[in-house]
């Protein structure tokens, strides 16, 4: 670690510690005159504002109702002594503030003497619990947080997250407006916010950066939210408009996970919960979970501890169908495609997630806070994936003028065959482990009524470990059919667009098919181990001043932050090619298994014929018994060992300044700017796939001697890149009367390029050619390489929203719109250069396949949200309520792909329409909910030259439900059903939705849970 890093860490640690180690007596003496409380009271009816003030300040307050009636209070936000706050609220009414007893204020009529000072009671204000026992209360709490926020934020309360039919944070977030869920193995993993790719989101815990554990080192900055537990949380926020004190990396938004503190509970708190369930696809797929949460205050309620622990276990099965290499066929429409490769697979596994959190907070007085927070979670996935790939082959060669059969032999738009086929089977068995840690030391200190200083030092690390990943493979080819013979295999599309085998010409497969063990030949045993590590230090210091300017409230805030991130991917690959005598899966005991073995589900593309695949145990036994039959493939192992490897040192230094000015009591403006400087050092390797000589080169004229590497060499490639971004923001808020809130903003933010895009991992091919006409020998190179010089995405965002809150606090209605101008989106490109230098050599022809920044694009949308408790209805119908939202999103960016007729495409993972609706009922101890979710089609992850072949995720609808009853003594029993309609995850080609490029089905889940609060 550099000297600068040591200095930053040390300075932040000293600052954090200094905030709370001052002598307690001195702190209490200073606070005796100027104890303040944090208030956030919107402009409203004065009587309601005074009652809200009493609640937030933890005091009793008495006032003459007739004096305050028909008066409107100013908005009051910031830290004030209780007396000063009361004075501001009643300014101009003729009321005078007096203290009748410690913790009590009385407002009486009479002239108020300027310069009068009051001392606040040192008695501690009672706290309000964050525990929410019902969904309706959870919505009310979330609504209140959203209303008080200066920026546009969507909130899920503790009940929304921990007690929905949702097992992780990603699943729960999909119920908020403009959130698109991306699933993996039937469970939500990533979220796209407002049409922006997951890599453009930021994820924090209690406002502090948390490391992300990505997938196979390839998901980069996208945070897999299934790793993070949804138990023992206070709330989850999506900040759709970011303020200058927030990280700039947030074009989509910032997901902030808020954990409880012991001060959130009035008394000692203990909650224990257990859950059991099953998934109905596969055999005996069980679900178990348990968690415990505890809170207690010590030492006269100055020290509070919150601790939680969780264990979650799930077995699962899914069945998978994919196609690739689509082609057209003679005699059929030129835009109608048939697959030339079909994959049938099944995933059988079990997931474990366990972890815990501890939050220790110290509050010796109202002016001082200090905290130590630790969070740990580990997500393990052990799975087996048997798979069969059926790849079409041409017919056998025939003498001219006859023409050999092509690969595709369609007889109609729904029936086709392959002249021959290759059956490539594998069984992938792997163990993934994803631990995430975070440790935060922080403190906050108020100096008088105006100044507040806060500092945090944060260490967080995430890993993805693959200690065991093996591929057991077989490959066998049939003969290709002659023009006079029937195709080796025929398919028919079913009603879903899935190609199913319908017949075989077994004469081309020695009387057998790929469904027979004796057909499939042992090919290879391959293994991979992988270690992905992200280690991050962050530190921040924030200073706030609360005061007035010309009689108007003013808050000034400034601060700085550093993020020191080390990221690395290290893969090791080994491959043993089978070079012994021909051996089929029937040739050694235990070499194959049926898809239906164990917890698998029978996979019968042809009724009555179940699929088979290589068996791990049999292959390992065969390898141990006959090691002489296998030859180590050193070249391929080396190439695959480094194809994903890189190391990144990324240092980010940021500073900001902002003001919050109340132009009127009900209208405020936040203005400011953030500056972020990013330094990146990136280290990767290139694999020299070939350095090929040309026999046509005249003797003695070869130029390969200029090339400092040879075939199979590995070359080190490192790059350094830095950039600075200035991110201004302007946010306005107008509380219109008691029930309306209007917000508007113009903000800027960035999205740093993904790690895999900027890592200069490369594959190099070098050749030479001879130009006889000019008697010139040309040196040529073709390189696939990342681009460390990519500029960050830049977002210029316009937001406006109007909220209406029902007078009886029974709900709200919101409508908003947004427009994002996105510069520097990243896309794939092929560059061709003349006389180009690479690794010290100048090539006459240099072809580079890489990624580049695109021209400006945009994302725009409208969000509508309604939440209403039907309290006006007569009992028992007053227990009903509804929460619904809809988002309509559109995007466009222009990319330059050679051969593509139209470069205007939508952003990745952007759905045009997203709908959510929940109907709920709560009365007495009974509660029930039905949740519906719709996600429209969304683009995949790449575009090619042919728009017909663009990949889209199909629209998806899901229904979940939950019933619960809470008995006396806080004993609650819940029954939850998830994915009740069991829709498949389907991808299709752009031109024809009937052409399924992939489909995966999962079962429905049913869970019974019991919780008890003590």
Image (cartoon, rainbow, N blue to C red):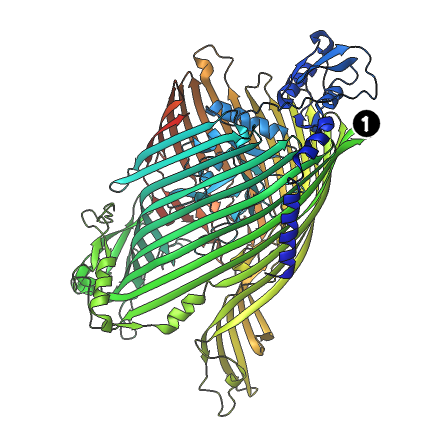
Mark 1 — residue? 551
Quadrant (top left, top right, bottom left, bottom right) of the C terminus: top left
Q: Residue furthest top?
A: 66
Q: Residue furthest bottom?
A: 699
Q: Is residue 231 left or right of residue 417?
A: right
Q: Is residue 556 above or below residue 839?
A: above
Q: Is residue 596 left or right of residue 326?
A: left
Q: Is residue 242 left or right of residue 866?
A: right
Residue 200: x and y, percent?
56, 48
Residue 609: x and y, percent?
19, 50
- Name the foreground residue: 233 vs 626: 233
Res 854 quadrant in image: bottom right
> Is any part of residue 855 visible from this angle?
no
Quadrant (top left, top right, bottom left, bottom right) of the N terminus: bottom right
Q: How many marks?
A: 1
Q: Is residue 245 left or right of residue 762?
A: right
For image coordinates 54% across by 55% down, the residue present is 754
For image coordinates 52% across by 75% down, the residue present is 781
> Is any part of residue 167 visible from this angle?
yes
Which secondary structure, mark 1? loop
For image coordinates 46% across by 33% down, the residue present is 161
Crowdedness near tag 1: few (<14), some (14–19) or many (≥20) residues, C-alpha within 10 Å? few
Residue 852: x and y, percent?
58, 60
Residue 803: x and y, percent?
62, 26
Q: Is residue 837 above or below residue 277?
A: below
């Amino acid at each position: 670690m550099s000297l600068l890093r040591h200095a930053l860490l040390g300075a932040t640690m000293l600052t954090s510690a200094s905030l709370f180690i001052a002598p307690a007596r001195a702190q209490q003496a200073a606070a005796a005159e100027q104890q303040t409380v944090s208030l956030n009271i919107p402009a409203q009816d004065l009587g309601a504002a005074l009652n809200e003030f009493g609640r937030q300040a933890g005091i009793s307050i008495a006032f003459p109702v007739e004096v305050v009636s028909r008066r409107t209070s100013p908005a009051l936000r910031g830290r004030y002594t209780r007396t000063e706050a009361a004075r501001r609220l009643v300014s101009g009414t003729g009321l005078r503030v007096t203290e009748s007893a410690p913790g009590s204020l009385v407002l009486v009529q009479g002239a108020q003497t300027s310069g009068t000072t009051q001392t606040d009671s040192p008695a501690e204000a009672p706290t309000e619990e964050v525990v929410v026992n019902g969904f309706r209360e959870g919505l009310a709490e979330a609504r209140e947080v959203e209303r008080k926020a200066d920026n546009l934020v969507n909130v899920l309360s503790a009940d929304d997250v921990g007690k929905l039919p949702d097992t992780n944070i990603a699943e729960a977030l999909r119920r908020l407006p403009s959130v698109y869920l991306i699933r993996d193995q039937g469970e939500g993993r990533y979220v796209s916010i407002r049409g922006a790719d997951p890599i453009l989101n930021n994820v924090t815990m209690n406002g502090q950066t948390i490391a992300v554990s990505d997938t196979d080192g390839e998901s980069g900055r996208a945070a897999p939210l299934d790793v993070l537990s949804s138990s023992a949380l206070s709330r989850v926020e999506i900040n759709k408009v970011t303020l200058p004190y927030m990280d700039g990396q947030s074009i989509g938004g910032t997901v902030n996970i808020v954990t409880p503190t012991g001060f959130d509970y009035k008394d000692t708190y203990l909650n224990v919960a257990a859950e059991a369930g099953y998934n109905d696809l596969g055999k005996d797929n069980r679900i178990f979970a348990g968690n415990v949460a505890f809170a207690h205050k010590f030492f006269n309620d100055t020290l509070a501890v919150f601790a939680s622990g969780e264990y979650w276990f799930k077995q699962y099965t899914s069945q998978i169908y994919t196609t690739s290499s689509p082609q057209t066929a003679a005699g059929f429409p030129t835009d109608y495609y048939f697959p030339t490769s079909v994959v049938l697979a099944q995933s059988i596994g079990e997931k474990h997630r366990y972890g815990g959190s501890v939050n220790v907070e110290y509050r010796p007085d109202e002016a001082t806070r200090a905290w130590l927070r630790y969070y740990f979670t580990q997500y393990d996935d052990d799975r087996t994936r048997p798979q069969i790939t059926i790849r079409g082959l041409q017919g056998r060669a025939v003498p001219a003028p006859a023409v050999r059969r092509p690969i595709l032999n369609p007889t109609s738009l729904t029936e086709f065959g392959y002249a021959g086929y290759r059956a490539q089977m594998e069984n992938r068995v792997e163990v993934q482990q994803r631990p995430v840690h975070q440790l935060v030391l922080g403190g906050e200190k108020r100096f008088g009524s105006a100044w507040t200083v806060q500092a945090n030092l944060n260490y967080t690390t995430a890993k993805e470990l693959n200690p065991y990943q093996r591929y057991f493979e077989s490959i066998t080819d049939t003969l290709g059919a002659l023009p006079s013979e029937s195709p080796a295999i025929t398919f028919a599309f079913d009603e879903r667009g899935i190609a199913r085998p319908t017949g075989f010409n077994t004469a081309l497969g020695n009387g057998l098919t790929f469904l027979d063990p004796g057909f499939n030949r042992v090919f290879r045993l391959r293994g991979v181990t992988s270690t992905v590590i992200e280690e991050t230090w962050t530190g921040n210091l924030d200073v706030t001043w609360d005061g007035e300017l010309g009689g108007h409230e003013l808050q000034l805030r400034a601060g700085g932050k550093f993020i020191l991130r080390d990221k690395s991917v290290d893969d090791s690959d080994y491959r043993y090619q089978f070079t012994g005598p021909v051996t089929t899966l029937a040739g050694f005991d235990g070499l194959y298994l049926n898809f239906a073995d164990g917890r698998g589900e029978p996979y019968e593309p042809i009724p009555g014929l179940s699929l088979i695949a290589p068996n791990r145990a049999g292959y390992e036994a065969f390898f141990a018994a006959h090691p002489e039959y296998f030859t180590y493939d050193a070249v391929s192992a080396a190439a695959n060992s480094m194809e994903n490897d890189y190391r990144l040192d990324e240092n980010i230094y940021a500073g900001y300044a902002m003001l919050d000015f109340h132009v009127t009591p009900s209208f405020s403006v936040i203005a400011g700017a953030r500056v972020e400087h990013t330094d990146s050092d990136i280290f990767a390797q290139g694999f020299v796939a070939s350095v090929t000589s040309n026999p046509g080169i005249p003797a003695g004229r070869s130029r390969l001697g200029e090339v400092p590497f040879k075939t199979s060499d590995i070359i080190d490639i490192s790059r350094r890149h830095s950039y600075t971004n200035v991110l201004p923001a302007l946010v306005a808020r107008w509380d219109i009367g008691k029930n309306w809130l209007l917000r508007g903003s113009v903000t800027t933010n960035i999205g740093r390029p993904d790690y895999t895009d900027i890592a200069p991992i490369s594959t190099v091919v070098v050749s030479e050619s001879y130009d006889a006409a000019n008697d010139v020998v040309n040196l040529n190179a073709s390189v696939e390489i990342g681009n460390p010089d990519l500029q960050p995405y830049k977002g210029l965002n316009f937001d406006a929203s109007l909220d209406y809150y029902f007078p009886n606090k029974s709900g709200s209605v919101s409508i908003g719109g947004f427009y994002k101008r996105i510069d520097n989106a990243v896309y794939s490109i092929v560059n061709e250069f003349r006389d180009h230098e690479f690794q010290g050599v100048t090539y006459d022809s240099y072809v580079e396949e890489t990624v580049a920044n695109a021209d400006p694009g945009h994302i725009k949308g409208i969000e509508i949200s309604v939440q209403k408790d039907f309290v006006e209805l007569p009992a028992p119908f007053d227990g009903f309520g509804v929460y619904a939202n809809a988002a309509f999103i559109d995007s466009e960016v222009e990319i330059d792909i050679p051969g593509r007729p139209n470069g205007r495409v939508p952003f990745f993972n952007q759905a045009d329409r997203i709908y959510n609706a929940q109907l709920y009922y709560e009365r007495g101890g009974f509660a029930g909910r039905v949740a519906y979710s719709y996600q429209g089609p969304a683009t995949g992850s790449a575009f090619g030259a042919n728009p017909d072949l663009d990949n889209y995720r199909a629209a998806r609808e899901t229904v979940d439900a939950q019933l619960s009853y809470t008995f006396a003594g806080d004993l609650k029993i819940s029954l939850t059903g998830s994915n009740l309609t069991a829709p498949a995850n389907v991808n299709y080609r752009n031109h024809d939705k009937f052409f399924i490029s992939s489909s995966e089905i999962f079962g429905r889940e049913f869970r019974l849970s019991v919780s008890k609060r003590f």
